[in-house]
Image (cartoon, coloured by chain):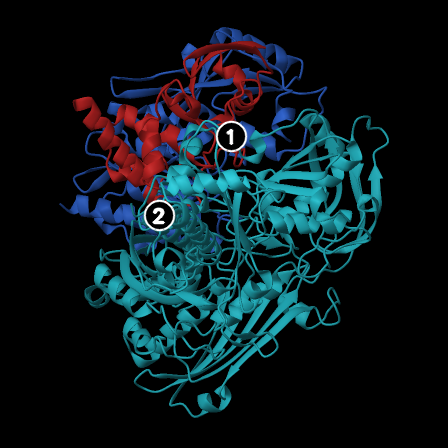
Amino acid sequence: MPLVGKSVPRVDGPAKVAGTARYVDDLTRPGVLLGATLRSPVARGRLRGIRRDPSFDWTGVTVVTAEDVPVNVVALIEEDQPVLASDEVRHAYEPIALVAAEDPVRLARALRALTAEIDPLPPILTVADALQRKAQIHGPDNIFATYRISKGDAAKAIAESPVRLTGTYRTHHQEQLYIEPQGMLAFWDGRGAHLVGSLQCPFYVHKGVKRTFSLDDAHVDVTQAVTGGGFGGKEEYPTLLALHALLLAKKSGRPVKMIYDRQEDIEATTKRHPCEVTISSGCDREGHLSAVSIRIVMDGGAYVTLTPVVLSRSALHAAGAYRWDHVAIEAVAVATNTPPNGAFRGFGAPQTIWAIERHMDRIARELSADPLALREKNLLRVGDTTPTGQFLKESVGVQRCVEEARSASGWERKRATLGPAAAARPVSAILRRPVPGGSASRKARGIGASVFLHGAGFTGSGERNLRGRVAIDMFRLLAEKKPRFRIRTASTDIGQGTETVFRQIAAEALWVSMDRVDFATPSTATVPDSGPTVASRTVMIVGSILEHAARDLFARIEQDRQEHGGSFDDAALRLIARDGTVVSEKTYETPADVVWDDATYRGDAYPVFGWGCDIAEVEVDLDTFETTVLGFWAAQDVGKAIHPVMCKGQIEGGTLQAIGWALNEKVVFKDGKILNARMTNYVVPTSLDAPRFTTILVEDPYSKGPGGGAKGIGELPMNGGAPAIAAAIEHATGIVRDDLPLLPEDLFEARRAGT
Amino acid sequence: MNPAEIALYPFERPGTLAELCRTLSARAGRKERTVLLAGGTDWIVERRLAPPEDPNDLPLVVDVSRLPEMRGITVAREIATIGAAATFLEIKSHPVLSRRAPVLTAMAREVGAVQIQARGTLGGNLASASPAADGAAALMALDADVVLASIHGERRVPLTQFFTGYRATRRAEDEVIVRVEFTLPRTGAHQVWRKVGTRAAQAISKVALAAVAEVARGRGVRSGFGMASVAPVTVSLPSVRALGLAPSLASVSDEELDAATRRDIAPIDDLRSTAAYRAYVASALVKGFFRELRMAAGS
Amino acid sequence: MRMTFVVNGRSRTLDAPPLARLLDILRGPLGLTGTKEGCGEGECGSCTVLLDGVPVNACLVVAGQCDGRTVLTVEGLASRDALSDLQEAFVKEGGAQCGICTPGILMAAHALLATNPQPGEGEIRESIAGNICRCTGYQRIVESIRHAAKEQAARESG
């Protein structure tokens, strides 16, 4: 009964389709109060105090300010972010005070009866202003982090190259827009602090609560509710929300539920880091790449949050899926007085992959080369070394991805037949000069490609430091005659299918049917810390710990069966009778041959990489510059697809987010505030905007991946969509865009400017 | 304000139009505000975004969605009559309208998505007087009349005169829009609904063009236009209309169309788009329509 | 205001402010939390229910206008013994990932198949264009609906 490789029915599916799955807003507790947040209306200022309107009846309303916070820091990489602002505000929407009341009308009125008294200060709103130190808003130089990666002598090699090109590429904010807003339910009892919420990482929240309230492990319990999407947006942010809810619960003595409304969610929570990348390259006239020098500048917003790790990943992906003899990468992340940016699928890689892919298209233009052929000449292979000096030992399926996508899409034919046939018609500036008329087709079609990679698992020594754990319990229910198994892990299902895929892995390794395997709700009181649900590590890393635990348990049962006879179940029941619940717990051991040096940023940046080739076919309406994606071919090397339908779901979902990032989504800031914080004007693709995907699973197994070689897949699809679309638009219209987004207005302006 | 605050508003449902008109008249006389609620798809969103009103001075919300005099779609002797409480869903699925006034049914099909079409009404769309109102643009191209009722009876206002400024109409405080009427375009008329939104569905127009034209022996004999989101009100494109009635459509040049379009619109930069883009698209859509007319006139 | 409507086949009478949202009536006093709130402004469709058989955003429908009408929510799709064809298809064909948009999409799809049992892909996509999904890219949802249509047709033809 092979389970791995089979697209079994989704285990949490029936509850979700029946409407019985309980998300945090579906939960309540007796006596619950509703909570809300008073936020800064300005991007920067000195907070003098909080004024309560004396004419408002404050009975039954709880107000919490910074004075009520025992340790006023949000514990993350650094502790620079306060739980509530105390004497200054560093970004618009920064939380200043909290309010709780029994009913929503009272709550809204109480919130309006509170005013934060702020003396505004001139905010730093651009990276340029921050680097020029127009004000000191973080440390001496407004810099959060810097990384350098170096191989060979890039400057010299570029200078000596026959073809030298430079370009600057920019990407913009993106909002995760999980359809379920952030939410948390908090209460205190004799056993300490309790939280149930929409979240990805229960132990991140656990750590933050321990720190702020000075509690030990046993007195904090965080449980994940069924979560309606995260994409990184519920990686670190929920810790802050949890602290808020707990503060109100503590002061009021009642349970507190806080659910963000959509506008608040878009305004106040983290976004993808905007980024500017400058690339200089050297190659020969045949397109053999030699050297690249890359400078990355990221806007981190007002507090550190996860910026150093995002920056790190952006640097580690900046050279793309290609072989370079000489590489120089410098990356810096900068503070501004905007809402802190944070984790979003891809986590720095989409930004730098956008840049390197657009740069490869620049080289292709210069050399009049087919963009895919140029890439193919230079793809990394097993035996090559990456910019950090990582020797690629195995599982580099990128060549096959290119071949599959190319043949499925009809690339050669379309490159030749589509293109700027009707595109070369200039737009007159402000209609003062006649626009040549005629009845030629007003639509242009094109096809473009991207090739990309994504390191699976934590960067560098991350997994080694983390030492994630997974446990499997074996027990017997009174009414049953066979053993049951329960997986205990901190890895959460946020839609990507953890609950199902982990059961497949465990059941297969235990040689039992899936219906005998349970998945414990991730709750810090009962599951071991497997590490966070991020970094494309859930199946590859945590799944391998699980597989190890399951195999170990199987071996113990087998050994007993060998010694005492009978069936597998007989042996299992004997062990249960002897030990009660039998537990198999394993800790992740980083393979000895994965070696990384944090000081020099050299070595094996990731245990293994996922690879992909995306090809997009578009039609651009030359009357409106609207881009329709006619077809999309995504060929991605996942190592081994444990659940093919879910794998495709990850690829299609992630790719559409990347397409949305390119064609529809834009966060509009003014004076550090967001103007379009609603779903009507922060625009994501609908079913009529989404193309038909042809999704090709390529399997180049990773020897240490579970289920016969699975690699991380969650983030890889985010990296290829945007540059493929830009390349296709370029092919269709001749418009070259090095910056995202590619809204109709952007294409129109580019055409007007003659680029 | 939040939904719980909206729930505090008082609510009434009159059983007949006459009852409604009496209520409106009495309240207008006492300077008390009344909200006419049909589908609610505009009003509820607008209340969510608005600051709260004084709870002691809330307007009365009156449900008009079930008034028989405001419902239904009829076609008789080439005149289409659409009740103000007819939904976009009813409009888009009407067989005669689909055949004879596809500009209207195509527009209805692109309002929001199914859920909005099921509740949104033409009356609500006109009363909101948003310059982005799709229904207003399509009806303007059809040269529709708006029929208003009050205790004094009915009066009609051509739609081209109905909007007086940004979100302002000729409807008096004691009046209600009961229906719209237009003469069906002749079979074979050229009709276009082209909405350029922020995405393919669930979108507000950046520019939308509605056009109805009848051509006979090379000349335009009916020429109606409505354009959304290019001015504080829905525009009827009068200069373009005039060109549409030219003695010889074949001789109308793109330059003239550009100039006429530019004369008739006043686009701005806003959250959804830019003035320059809107101007370009408005002109491109108009020229595209005339390209079609010229081809038909030529044959 | 006292109001009566039929919810999932049962007549329910309750007292509620007429301008309370149908969404809050369903999730609150009626205890039907299957219908979700994603945006509160009729953009995301996760609050879609059928009102007299037609999909609407329950966050934009006021309770007072539902008096005497019929409402169908996700809790009303399954029979006592089994999930509907649509629900089964979503479980098996990857139509649901995080599941928050799923109830709303099921309602829109249910309404589609009730009037158009053999929809083409374009019709399917149009019927769910008012339901935003951030997880799936829509393809698996379209496949699930297509699959359910086939199952339904096969069952009905014998």
| Secondary element at image label 1 | loop
Q: Residue furthest front?
A: A564
Pointer 1: what residue? B42
**Depth order, front residue of A565/A159:** A565
Pointer 2: what residue? A690
Q: Is residue A537 visible?
A: yes
* Tag 1 and tag 2 share a subunit: no
Q: Is residue B94 above or below residue A310?
A: above
Per the rendering, the colour in which chain C appears is red
Q: Is residue A268 visible?
A: no
Report the disc number at residue A267. Answer: none
Q: Tell me where residue A645 appears, x and y as whole percent.
A: 33, 47
Q: Chain of mark 2?
A: A
Per the rendering, the colour in which chain B appears is blue
**Depth order, front residue of A376/A644:** A644
Q: Quadrant of residue A194?
A: top right
| Tag 1: amino acid | Asp
| Tag 2: amino acid | Ala
Q: Report the Cα–Cα distance between label 1 and label 2.
A: 27 Å
Q: Tell me where residue A206 appears, x and y as whole percent.
A: 66, 48
| Secondary element at image label 2 | loop
